[in-house]
Image (spheres, rainbow, N blue to C red):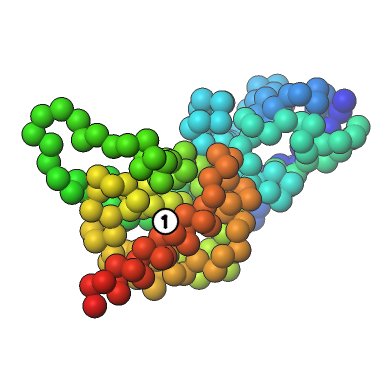
Amino acid sequence: MNIVLRIKRYNPETDEAARFQDFTIAAEPADRLLDCLMLIKRTMDGTLSFRKSCAHGVCGSDAMTINGVERLACKTLVQDVAEEEGAVVTVEPLRSLPVQRDLMVDYTRFFEAYRVVKPFLFPVAKVEEGENIQAPEVRKKFDDPTKCILCASCQSACPVIVEGKDFLGPAAIVQAARFVFDSRDEGIAPRLDVLGAPNGAEACEGHFECTRVCPRGIKVTKNINLTKRAVKQFKEKDD
């Protein structure tokens, strides 16, 4: 079948504003959108810019907005977004992140928020020998947020961030939750100044868009709400 990829283009060196460019290609329903983009780059326009790496939904580098929804190009099949001959598939960069070129965005602020939540272990006790053993049922409490691949789809879909409000972001809170609920970690205490700040966990308005677009199926909003509760309980206990 033939489909049209309507791709948002922007080259800061030559363009005053972004524009859309259409590419008509032949594709099979089971082809991945990433394959379609690669076909365009290899045979039609070598200047088309986008990120990719593993192409298996693990690295998160090819996250983009496809027909208005944040997706990974490598996990999106043509049949997922184009149902008929001549269908138009609109491809845009992630929202809320500065565009570097075409479908490539600047992740600087995104990773700054990631680092500020201290996404590493603050051990509650040192183990002199062997490992710090943890029961499977305890491990399950923070299993969900460990699936995050930092693709920034949730950041792009978050209405709070899209509206320009000051919010650390769903991905950063999820990264914090991974350690907050780890029994081997000190939890909220070393992260209270960040998670308990006005732009921390409480800034989430519960729109659930982050959960809907997460390519790893993480219950993002649930983890943010659990973190809110943990912050509140810690503050009450501290008082």
Q: Residue furthest bottom?
A: 239
Residue 32 seen from this side: yes
Q: Secondary structure at mark 1?
A: helix
Image side of residue 195 versus residue 21, left or right = left
Residue 95 seen from this side: no
In the image shown, does 42 or 211 lie closer to the viewer? Answer: 211
In the image shown, does 16 or 154 lie closer to the viewer? Answer: 154
Image side of residue 52 versus residue 20, left or right = left
- The residue drawn where x is 56% and y is 26% is 56
Q: Is residue 57 above or below residue 111?
A: above
Image side of residue 136 versus residue 91, left or right = left
Q: Quadrant of the C terminus?
A: bottom left
Image side of residue 142 versus residue 156, left or right = left
Q: Hey, what amino acid is under mark 1?
A: Ile
Q: Is residue 110 above or below residue 35?
A: below
Residue denoted by label 1:
173
Name which quarter of the figure residue 83 lies in: top right
Rendered location of residue 115, percent (x, y) = 32, 51
- The residue drawn where x is 62% and y is 56% is 209
Rendered location of residue 79, percent (x, y) = 79, 32
Q: Residue furthest left?
A: 128
Instruction: Check disc 1: other Cα within 10 Å, few if <14, some if 14-19, many if 20+.
Output: many
In the image shown, does 18 or 56 lie closer to the viewer? Answer: 56
Name which quarter of the figure residue 36 lies in: top right
- The residue drawn where x is 60% and y is 63% is 207
Q: Residue furthest right?
A: 85
Q: Quadrant of the N terminus?
A: top right
Q: Is residue 51 above or below residue 172?
A: above
- The residue drawn where x is 50% and y is 70% is 165
Rendered location of residue 205, percent (x, y) = 54, 68
